[in-house]
Amino acid sequence: MSLSGRVALVTGASQGIGRACALKLAAAGASVAVAARNHEKLTELVQQIESGGGKASAFPLDVADEEQVKTAFKAALAQLGKIDILVNNAGITRDQLIMRMKRADWDSVLNTNLTSAYLCTQQAIGSMLKQRWGRIINITSVFGQTGQAGQANYAASKAGLIGLTMAVAREVASRNITCNAVAPGFIETAMTSGFSDDFRQGALKMIPLGRVGTPEDVANSVAFLASEEASYITGQVLSVNGGMLMG
């Protein structure tokens, strides 16, 4: 699955799934623009990719800030010339039961997880339309498919990403641009590291494959959807959850 000659931009690339996606896409031959709030981690990631013979550039970015999104994408396009592959991965949680959830926590999660994907797609789509080739991949979640107590904001944002994926897929298919989503299950990342042992054990009982997923499990799926081999797949949700949710 060679991505030689392609340019990818990954949001939330400083750690976890986003970092794994950037490394995988670079290993497949793509030049990778890595975007996140943590400039120090982005610099380390660029150095790691370049030390392995890949190409990468860092673009500090808070995806919840529309002006920062516009500025970062303009800079990426100016420096790299195009964007072939967009991975909308940036995401946060602000968990609380719905009756106690503060409006600020609702807005923060929806802005970072969902509105940012709209903003980033809008900035990247012109380049894809011009060259009549593109891959948009949104990182959603199994909880966007099933819901989760205490995560009304997170589940709503991830369910919204699925709807966004299908709508955009229909809009741009005639221009040879695909738009798909990847829905991870329980993945070992900084976001899940704070879960209690009881929660982890309960989650494992729900996973037929009997193990927690890794960021690389998700990155492998993203790289496939970004490739020519996935050219006839669009508007789909690829579940990477060890069998946690089927059907």
Image: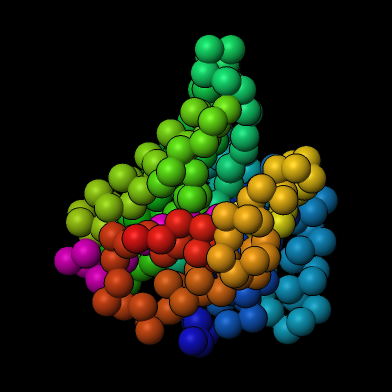
Is residue 142 visible to us here? Answer: yes
Q: Nearer the viewer, residue 60 or 101?
A: 101
- In the rendered structure, the answer to whether residue 206 lies left or right of residue 130 reads right
**Is 89 included in the stretch rendered in magenta?**
no
Identity of the residue drawn at 53% across and 12% down: 99
Colouring mode (rainbow / by chain / secondary structure / one colour): rainbow
Residue 150 found in image quarter: top right
The total number of labels drawn is 0
> Which segment did they paint magenta?
173-185
Q: Nearer the viewer, residue 161 or 57?
A: 161
Q: Position of residue 177 (x, y in %)?
A: 29, 66
Identity of the residue drawn at 48% across and 50% down: 142
Q: Position of residue 65 (x, y in %)?
A: 55, 32
**Quarter the C terminus occupies:** bottom left
Q: Magenta residues: mostly which secondary structure? A: strand
Is residue 111 visible to us here? Answer: no
Q: Nearer the viewer, residue 99 or 182?
A: 99
Q: Position of residue 188 (x, y in %)?
A: 71, 57
Identity of the residue drawn at 65% across and 66% down: 210
Q: Position of residue 225 (x, y in %)?
A: 42, 72
Residue 208 found in image quarter: bottom right
Q: On screen, 105 above or below 77?
A: above
**Is 183 included in the stretch rendered in magenta?**
yes
Q: On screen, 15 above or below 154?
A: below
